[in-house]
Each structure stands twice: as C-alpha cells, then as structure tokens.
Amino acid sequence: MAALQPPISDNRPLHLVSVTPNRRRAACYELIEFRLNLQATYTNAFDPNEIAVEGVFTTPSGSTVQVPGFFYRAYTRKLEGRDERLSPDGEADWRIRFAPTLPGRYQMQVTVRDSTGKTTRSLPLAFECVRSRLPGFVRVCKDDKRYFVFDNGQPYVAIGANVCWGSSRGTFDYDDWLPHYAQAGGNYFRLWLGPAWVTFAMERTGEPRERYGVGKIDLANAWKLDYVLNLARRLGMYVMLCFDSFNELRKRQFGGFPYWEETPHNAANGGPLKEPIEFWTHPDMLRAYRNKIRYMVARYGWCTNVLSWQFWNEVDIVGPDAYNLELITRWHREMADYLRRLDPWKHLITTSFADSNGREVIDRLPQIDYTTTHNYGSRDTSSALTFFHRKKEVYGKPHYVAEFGAGAMGEDPHVDPTGIALHSGIWSTLLDGAAGTAMLWWWDNHIHPHDLYYHFAALSRFIRGVNFPQESFRRVEKYTFSWKQPMPSPAYEDLTLHGPTSWDVHPSNRPTTVLVDAEGKVEIREQVAGLLHGLRNHRDKHNPLTIETNLPHSTRLRIFVTGVSGHGGAHLVVERNGARVLDRDMPDPDDTRKTDTLHQYDGEYAVDIPAGKQVVTVKNIGNDWVFVSYILEKALRQTEPPLRLFGLRGKKTSLLYIEHTRHTWYQVNVMKRPPAPVPPTVLRIRDWTPGRYRVQFWDTYEGKPLSTQTVTAGRSGLRLDIPRVERDIAVRIEQA
C-alpha cells in the first residue's frame, strides 16, 4: 500500500513542462486552479528557500497579484467501521489556486526558482472572469465596526459553534454535523489545525523517513481540510481556521492537556525547540512558521468561506516557562504583518486567550482585526458573556464569544442536557451587540447527540432580514420592569448565592459576609466564592462565608456541593450563633495519589435558621477546596420582576431579548430549583422615538411569533405589556 505522505523532494533539473488550468472562464470569487507539471531540485517541497512557486496575475485593472503555489496530492476516502481511511489518488503535483474578484480578462504567468538558484517562467495564460452573485470575502464593516460585511455589502452575522475536529470518522463526521447547522440557519464553525492529533493537523510528529514534522505539511490532512471547506461552500458556512493551540508548548508537569513532550516542535521529536519559550524567537522556528503560513495562503487563501485566520487557541496558557507577554505580543505583530503582506485576499486575523479578560495589549493591536472571548463555568451565562463583550467592544472592533460552556471538562451534557447555557449565550450576546452568537465548545458530545440545533434555528428565524450594520444599533440601557398587577405584600423569594472559583489572589478568596435585614434587603461585603479553601493547601486563601439574618420568619440555608479536591479532600462545617450545627468530613481516600475531583460527596446540605437575629458561618476546615453554592430560602424581598433585557434599538428594526434572571442552567439543573414563572409585567423604555410600531412577541425555542400588536410611543417613551415569562421571550419591533 502506498504511503499517504509522498516523497517531498526532487533531484531533477528545473523544468516547467506544462501549466493546465481547470477552466478558462470563472465567475468572481470562484476557484480557478492551475496544475503544474514541474521538475526541480529541492529537499523539502514546503520550504520556499528550496523551491518557490509563484503565480503572478495581471488583473483587468492592470494591477498585479502574486499568489504562492503549493505541493499537492489527491486522495480518496472510505469508511471502514467507524474509521476514515484515505488512499492516494494519483501522484503528487504542484498547484496554484486563485479567486478573481473583478470581472474582465486576466493573465497569469508561473515563475519557479529551485535550490540550485535557477529560475524558469511559463508563457502567459489568459482567462476570463464574469460577474457572479457570490458575496465575496468577509470584512469588517467600515460604517459600523462592530459588525462584519461581505465584499458586496451584504451583512454577515456569525451563527454557529466550535466544530474543531472529528472522531476517528474524520470528514464523515462533518457530513453529519454541518448540514444540521446549515439547516438551522448556522453559517459559522471553527476548525483546529494543531496539535498533531487533530483531524486537520498540518504538522505531525513522525520519523524523518515518514516526511512529517515542523515545516512539513501532512498532505492527507490538508486534503481533508479541502473536503470540509468545499462542503462549507456548498452549505454557505464560514470557517475560522485556528493554526495552533497552547497544548503544543505546554509541558506535562503543568497538567491541563499538555502536549509538549509529543509535539513535533520539540527537539526530542526532531523539531527546532529545546525549550517551549524558544518558539517566539528561534530563527528556525520563525522561518518554519512563516512557511506554514505561506502554505495556508497558497492552498486555502482563495476560499471566500475562510472567515479568518486565528493564530492561537488560548496562547496565554502555553505554560509558565513559555509565556512571555512581551515576546508573544511582538510575535503576533510581526506574524500578522507577514500574513497580511502575503495574503492577496486580506482575510481577517485574530487570536484567543483562556483568560476571559484577554490581553489588551494584543487585542488592541491594529494587526488583530477582531477580538474573541473564551469563558467556562459561569453559572449565569448571559451576565458573564455580556460583561466581557462590553469590556472588549471599547476596542472599536468586532467581538464575539468564540468558546464557552457550563464547564471546561465536558460537564455540559450532564449538567445542561437541554442546552440552557447554549440558549442564553447565543441570544444574549447577539442582542447585546456582538458580531455573532456566542460559540459553544461542546459540539460532538452535546449539541449533536442532544439535537440542540433548534436553538440556532429559532434565533436565525428571529433575525431574518435584519441588516445589522445598516441599522446603526444602539444598546437599550434605560428600561424598567414593573408588575402589571400588585404583588401580595410582603413577598419573599429565595436568595441564590454563588460566585467565581479561583486559586489565585482574588476578592472571593477572603472572608465574606452577607447581611439580610428584616426588610429582605441584601448587602454583600467582599465577594461570595464558588469554592471554599481549606486550611492546608491554600491556607492563605481560607474564605469562610458568614450570613447574618434578621428576618421576621424562619428560613433554611441550603448548601450545594458539586466537587471536592482530589488533593486531600475537604471538611465542611456550619456554625449557628457559635454552635456547630453541621459537621461533614469529606476525606480524600488516597490523600494525593489520585488527584481527580471527588464527586461522592456531591449533594445538598441544609441548616435551619430561626426568625430574628442569627449569625451562620460556613467554612472548610479540611485540607483543600470544595465547590459550593447556596440558597437562602425566602430571604430576598421581591420588589421588582426578576427580568433583564438585552436589546438593540435600530433605525427600522429593534430587537429585544427578555430573560428570567433566575432561569439559568445552574439554578435549574444543579440546584434543582426551577424558578416560578414571572406574571405579566410592564416594560418601559424611556429613550424611544415617538410613533406607531408593529410589535411581535417571539417564542425563542420554537422560533415563531406568539402575538403581534401595534403600539404607540409617546414623549415618555415606549410601553410594552409583557406576557407571563417562564424562561425568556424575544420582541421584534418595526415601524408600523
């Protein structure tokens, strides 16, 4: 059986035998491909110092465009059981790919220089380009830099998720997945091109005789990427191509999905790097990276469905011995400049960080066209994701949440089977002014097996026909909700307390006090933590929670444990007025030998609290941490409806998303406390142009209007009667 990777060297005298186009007439933005019958002398077909193939195109306007050529091999695929198998389909050859953008007559001439220093040129070839209805490449909108548009001015609003690699079924998985997104109105997904184990890895670890390694493209995986990009074109989907991930430079000793010991970059595996930090400065590594970029532009740059190049997945967690912000910033600036010069079609460029705050010095670089956020574990998805969106929109660039989930360790299918986090994330971010929906991470174990595509379908139907850039949207910020009918007095509701989890210096890692007075008003001093530290491993972060109540009725404190440290366990203690009323040791059976998080202690632990002045303290006196959250029953005075609004007010169309603040994945699925529906309310928005408006209320799960009415806005603004809200509701408002 022929090896998948063909020989990547040649020792024949330089001779360009023929140049054969696949067509002589192409529409704008369609592929015209030239196949080269080429003989030359080189040792590495992927190194332009060894062999540089270029196509020089003269456009109808008289300008010239230079496109690098690339080494290519075709393959066929088949499915054996659950495994994709590729077989070579003919011999390797050289190709040049081009997408014309102007109608008219073009000329193309091939130039080749090999390792002997000799150069040869083809005779000019002519071809015609005719107009087409294809929208072109995706750009940042010049009129409203929050959004994307195509070359022809049509808006592009990204709707989708991460679909970064396949299982052993490889591209056959994409035959299943992508049509589901497209049928639901999805038009975006993300692919990883590294580390070496992913479906589309460009560089793979291997023996030299296998012709793999840094600076050598895996042609079989590159063919897989061709296949999926062609599928994306047929389905109208656009792709973020992520070149590399933190894993490649992260050592095993640091945990967190390391791959340094196996990566082709490592000198132990034939790469140029003795230590990960050298990635940013080693001349051989920098040259190999530029060569990889050159190959990517040559092979995939023509494709309008490549939304953007992404340099890194979560570059801030490459590992403490590889992370240097100054070096990484300079690397991004210089590599982006090189990519921009090389790419004739000027695809968008971005990068990403694990820290939801990002790195402002990199996010603000003029070479970075748009910014993204990654966020996991936030128990109130809408609140967290829109917080980071608003933080980054000040950079004056498009922004969307490129990764999120209820958990970072695959918890979503178990803690959020119906996709509450997915639902809240895509609706809240888009209607808060993001350039696209938040993109859930868990595509293969959650979205597809639970058939959650209907969430995308509902949203895509709701925004159909809305031209986001042309609306000049302004965020709706000055609004109030009030009860339509007076509530029984006094009314109390459960007080939910949860917060961030941190092992660093953080406000939540200090003792915190929650005060609840007789009127049900709440004051929090410091910050409630989602994690209680013990007294051995992180004694300096010991953070007991004290709750002081003075309610006219008795209540109950419910403590929810969702994980205990595998580095020594925990010991939960609750004291009421100085007396211990709950004592639950949660030991680690093997202390620190096996460090997986312990879940045998998960569950609810409750303490009754009488009426009047009471002081309750919750603390962890064990070795290490415990994940916690709390409900204090009937403690919060209900003075206004528990609703929030994310909305965009436009020239012709306005879009509102109204969400029950307590209908979160954590409240419903972990605390097992689905909130009571909110009775009918009145929404008032003060800053609204007087006039008559057509108002549609939408079901955000079914994706269809519930009712339509005409309302009149006066000098005091817009008043809407909001029906009963169980989870959420959307409103589309247009001039009548």
Image (spheres, rainbow, N blue to C red):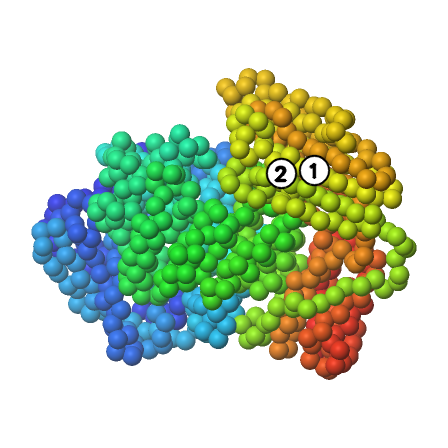
Residue 197: x and y, percent?
Answer: 40, 37
Residue at which label 1 appears = 546
As shown in the figure, which amino acid type bears the numbered disc 1? Thr
Q: Quadrant of residue 411?
A: top right
Residue at which label 2 appears = 511
As shown in the figure, which amino acid type bears the numbered disc 2? Pro
Q: Quadrant of residue 630?
A: top right
Residue visible at 17% across and 58% down in the picture? 112
Tell me the quarter of the image containing the C terminus: bottom right
Residue 40: x and y, percent?
Answer: 14, 51
Residue toward you, 392 or 223: 392
Indicate left or right for 344 with 18 as reference: right
**Mark 2 touches mark 1? (CB < 8 Å):** yes
Label 2, secondary structure: give it: loop
In the rendering, which numbered label is found on residue 693?
Answer: none
Vertical comparison of 486 with 662: above or below: below
Tell me the quarter of the image containing the N terminus: top left
Residue visible at 28% across and 33% down in the picture? 269
Disc 1 packing (10 Å; few <14; some 14–19; many ≥20): many
Residue toward you, 296 or 657: 657
Residue visible at 19% across and 55% down in the picture? 52
Label 1, secondary structure: give it: strand
**Distance of label 2 from label 1 (alpha carbons):** 8 Å
Upstream in the sequence, badge 2 or badge 1?
2
Residue 410: x and y, percent?
Answer: 57, 38
